[in-house]
Image (cartoon, rainbow, N blue to C red):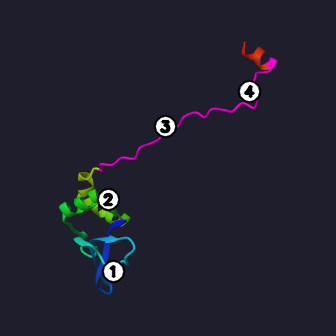
Amino acid sequence: MVKIRLRRVGTRNKPMYRVVVADRRSPRDGAFIEVIGHYNPLTEPETFVVDEEKALKWLRYGAKPTDTTLRLLSKAGVMDKFKPTVTKKTRVARPRKTKTTSGTKTKSTAEESS
């Protein structure tokens, strides 16, 4: 599975992050597929720059953003433009048929049904 997540760069006590597309099994600062933006939480207000076309492309391919990245993409307006094309099919719950213990009706059940 591919994730859109933050990759930490910068020095100690001065974090900056790159928004990357990476395999979920790779470490946080490990291998990645593509850089699609950057995020600096230390500026006032926080700086977030993302290439919308690349982000939308990866979302359409099925990449799942992490919680923080989802918040940032929503704030930037990227998630408003993304409409998932695949919807899950829901099964309609049907009432179950009850099994009868005997194949023939007894006299008392025949009288009750009349």
Q: CA distance from mark 2 to mark 3?
A: 26 Å
Q: CA distance from mark 2 to mark 4?
A: 53 Å
Residue wearing tag 2: 62
* Quarter of the rendering occupied by the C terminus: top right
In the image, which is nearer the foreground, mark 3 or mark 4?
A: 4
Q: Which mark is residue 103?
A: 4
Task: Compare marks 2 and 4 and give the one earlier in the sequence.
Answer: 2
Closest to the observer, 99 or 68: 99
Q: Are marks 2 and 4 in contact (CB under 8 Å)?
A: no
Task: Compare marks 2 and 3 and give the one earlier in the sequence.
Answer: 2
Q: Does residue 72 appear in the picture of this structure? A: yes
Residue wearing tag 1: 29
Q: Is residue 102 above or below residue 15?
A: above
The spot of residue 4 in percent (x, y) is: 31, 67
In the image, which is nearer the foreground, mark 2 or mark 1?
A: 2
Which amino acid type is shown beneath numbered disc 2? Gly
Q: Badge 2: how crowded within 10 Å, few (<14), some, or many (20+)?
A: some
Residue 20 lies in what quarter of the image? bottom left
Task: Compare marks 3 and 4 and give the one earlier in the sequence.
Answer: 3
Residue 93 in the magenta stretch? The answer is: yes
Q: CA distance from mark 2 to mark 1?
A: 22 Å
The spot of residue 74 in percent (x, y) is: 29, 58
Q: Which mark is residue 71?
A: none
Task: Compare marks 2 and 1 and give the one earlier in the sequence.
Answer: 1
Q: Which mark is residue 92?
A: 3
Q: Badge 4: how crowded within 10 Å, few (<14), some, or many (20+)?
A: few
- The prevailing secondary structure element of the residues shown in magenta is loop
